[in-house]
Amino acid sequence: MVTIAERLDAAYARIATAAKKCNRDEKDITLIAVSKKKPLEDILAAFDHGHREFAESYVQEGVEKVQALNDHKTIVWHFIGPIQSNKTKAIAEHFHWVQSVDREKIARRLNEQRPTNMKPLNILIQVNIDNDDNKSGCSVAQLPQLAELVDNSRQLHLRGLMAIPAKTDSFDAQLQSFEKLKACFDKLQTQYPQLDTLSMGMSADVDAAIAAGSTMVRVGTAIFGERS
Ligand SMILES: *Cc1c(COP(=O)(O)O)cnc(C)c1O
């Protein structure tokens, strides 16, 4: 049986290989282990192997895990799922990053509900880069206004962009979507030079994402196995 530690090593190696291919430094790409629908013991297996960055997609499940692992102070928790406005408080109180901010109402509520004794919440704006009706994310046209709101929010720290492109097995098609997001990121960065995070790439498209300039990949299946 392949262990989580071995799969994690394989994921790091895959990032290193993809980075090398396009003359990038692997250290500029952070691996987020997506642990949604996986038990605490799987997270602990990755933790014991030295991994510290984890992501969850469902509020209740994610909050339960953050609380259960509260004594593991070095874990960095990312929220990456769709956000209903009645769930923003729980997210603001428990996570370090929110990668799926896609509208002003959510940004406002996260800012109001982030406890003032905690560091500002790191925010990525999710962009619906392929205008896919089934995907969340703001449109490219809505991006400037939403970025301005987040940037002006005291309890939020605008860090960059996230996207989940339309599913395809073609490397070139994947690359094309990721390059669109990279172009949005570069443009936004001229206005907000502090932007340092471009979250794109999952188990099936990590290589194309890295070729297009990703600085953060979110990998679930390739580390923890298929989800039921
Ligand atoms: C589930 C999920 C992932 C991980 O997907 P895998 O294909 O299992 O690697 C990454 N990003 C988001 C936003 C997700 O919801």
Image: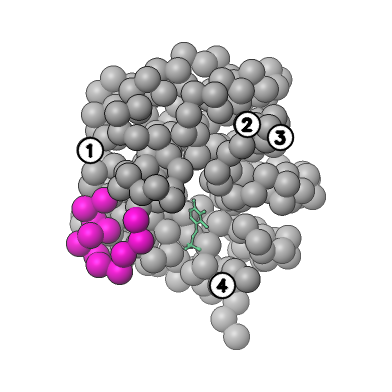
Residue designated by label 2: 85
Tell me what residue is drawn at x 56 percent, y 28 percent: 106
Q: Mark 4 near ligand 1 (CB under 8 Å)?
A: no
Eye-nearest disc, 2 or 3: 2
Residue designated by label 4: 225
Q: Secondary structure at mark 4?
A: loop
Residue designated by label 3: 90
User: In this rendering, would 154 be left or right of 160?
Assistant: right
* Residue neighbourhood size for the residue with mark 3, other residues' Cα within 10 Å, grouped as few (<14), some (14–19), many (≥20): some
First reached walking from the N terminus: tag 4 or tag 2: 2
User: In this rendering, would 131 be left or right of 40?
Assistant: left
Residue bounds of the magenta highlight: 166-177
Marks 4 and 3 close (CB-CB < 8 Å): no
Query: Considering depth in this image, is 46 or 176 the residue closer to the camera?
Result: 176
Residue designated by label 1: 183
Marks 2 and 3 close (CB-CB < 8 Å): no
Cα gap from disc 1 to disc 4, whole angstroms: 32 Å
Q: Secondary structure at mark 3?
A: helix
**Amino acid type, label 3:** Ala
Tell me what residue is drawn at x 27 percent, y 58 percent: 174
Tell me what residue is drawn at x 45 percent, y 71 percent: 10
Q: Secondary structure at mark 1?
A: helix
First reached walking from the N terminus: tag 1 or tag 4: 1
Cα gap from disc 3 to disc 1, whole angstroms: 33 Å
